[in-house]
Image (tube, rainbow, N blue to C red):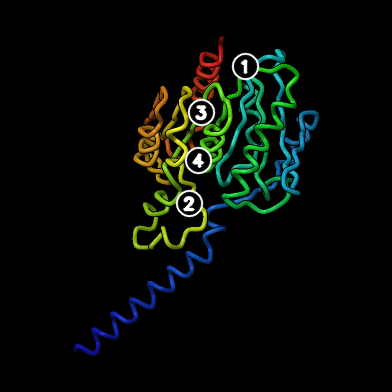
Amino acid sequence: MLRSLAIGFLAAGIGWLALVALLAFAQRSLLYHPLPIDPLLAERRRDAAVSIDNDGETLKGWLLAHSDPGAPLVIFFGGNGDEASRYLPAFETLTCCSVLAMNYRGYGESTGSPTEKNLRADALAVYDAAQKLRRTPGPTVLFGRSLGTGMAISTAAQRDIAALVLVSPYDSIAAVARDAFPWVPVSWLLQAQFHCLDFAPRIHTPTLAVVAERDRVVHKLRSLALVSALPGRVEPMIVPGEDHNSLLARDDIWRHLDQWIGDHTRH
């Protein structure tokens, strides 16, 4: 009997170690999901294509310029499975601003491979390059979705912005991973932890936080933990009935974003 129990515990332990090892090995593919560009959307806005070089790599994306050269500029940082060209139709509905949407390293036609360190560095480079792309200086708004919250937050803490939009934000990817895999020692294994709380105290700009009530990827508790850590004026918007991937499929959300950005960038 005792021998059978010991063998059972040993087998369970070996199985647990094997699963932990598998997750540790596969963590990059779980976190980053690079997609190719949508060729039809990209071709339709070929005139808006831009390239930004940083650290030996080339980031590719699009600048949708407003007719007013002094209009606000929104810089978009997408989620781990977002490819920027797929958002072009939605960005075109924004009437208040220009939009710069660049693909991360390895996404779309951007070169390189994503890591937390180089994505954060690229975000700063994109911000700096964006100011040079503008014909007239004006307010800048950072817009991060899901994984992109990490780039929006770290950039907002280090650059001058007028406002911040966070869709499905999180306090840290480490905390999100612990929610998904509570039986794994995430803090020991995870290479990219994206601790947004490290940057939050330095951000005092108006912030809109859009949260899906039924989000099963980034639980709303993770979003609200970040919201509570931001010292500036924060407007949490919890959207009932939506999940992580349906949130930005709603036209009324984009209309609200357009209105909010316009209201918070007028002098």
Sequence order check, earlier mark of 2 and 3: 3
Query: Label 4 amino acid?
Result: Ser
Sequence order check, earlier mark of 1 and 3: 1
Sequence order check, earlier mark of 4 and 2: 4
Estimate the spatial distance between the alpha carbons at disc 4 and disc 2, rounded to whole Å: 13 Å
| Residue at the outermost top position | 267
Q: Which residue is mark 4?
A: 146
Query: Label 2 amino acid?
Result: Gln
Query: Label 3 amino acid?
Result: Val
Query: Which numbered circle lies on residue 95?
Result: 1
Image quarter where the C terminus lies is top right
Q: Is residue 241 left or right of residue 32?
A: left
Query: Which numbered circle lies on residue 246?
Result: none
Query: Label 1 amino acid?
Result: Thr
Residue 120 picture location, percent across and down: 59, 43
Q: Which residue is mark 2?
A: 193
Residue 26 picture location, percent across and down: 53, 63
Q: Residues within 10 Å of mark 2 (few under 14, many from 20)?
A: some
At horizontal 66% and vertical 54% (from top left) the residue drawn is: 113
Using the image, determine if residue 218 lies above or below residue 261.
below
Q: Which residue is mark 3?
A: 165
